[in-house]
Amino acid sequence: MDWYEDESRVIQGRAQSIGAAMLVEREHLLPLAEEGFDLASLHFERHGKHEGTRAMIDILLLGREHGPTRVRQAVEEALE
């Protein structure tokens, strides 16, 4: 199935197509961050499996605030 077909699909129990719902949702999205942030300044010490998982979740949650593209760029820069 290509994305044109997917956007015209209507989920059971919904009145709008996926494409129409995406247009409505787009109005509520935050703009991309204009400035980067220093991921290295967010210091997560490793203290076992649970703490490592918590740190990873914290990094992923930064995507809500800064956008997934900026988080990915910051992680790539930090790993260089």
Image (tube, rainbow, N blue to C red):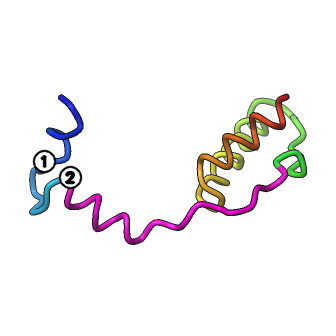
Is 44 in front, or is 16?
16
Circle 2 crowding by C-alpha within 10 Å: few under 14, some 14–19, many from 20: some
| Residue 66: mark in rendering | none
x 80%, y 56%: residue:
37
x 18%, y 40%: residue:
4
In the image, residue 22 lies in the stretch drawn in magenta? yes
In the image, residue 28 lies in the stretch drawn in magenta? yes
Which of the 4 image quarters holds residue 80?
top right
Is 10 in front, or is 8?
8
Q: Secondary structure at mark 2?
A: helix
x 59%, y 58%: residue:
64
Which of the 4 image quarters holds residue 50?
top right
Name above or below for residue 41 compared with residue 46: below
Residue 15 position, x and y percent, is 9, 63
In the rendered structure, the answer to whether residue 66 lies left or right of residue 55 reads left
x 90%, y 40%: residue:
45
Q: Which region shows up in magenta?
A: 18-38
- Report how many numbered discs are placed on residues in the image: 2
| Residue 8: mark in rendering | 1
| Image marks 2 and 1: residues in contact by CB distance under 8 Å | yes
Is 77 in front, or is 49?
77
In the rendered structure, the answer to whether residue 46 lies left or right of residue 1 reads right
Mark 2–mark 1 Cα distance, whole angstroms, equals: 6 Å
Name the residue that disc number 2 marks: 18
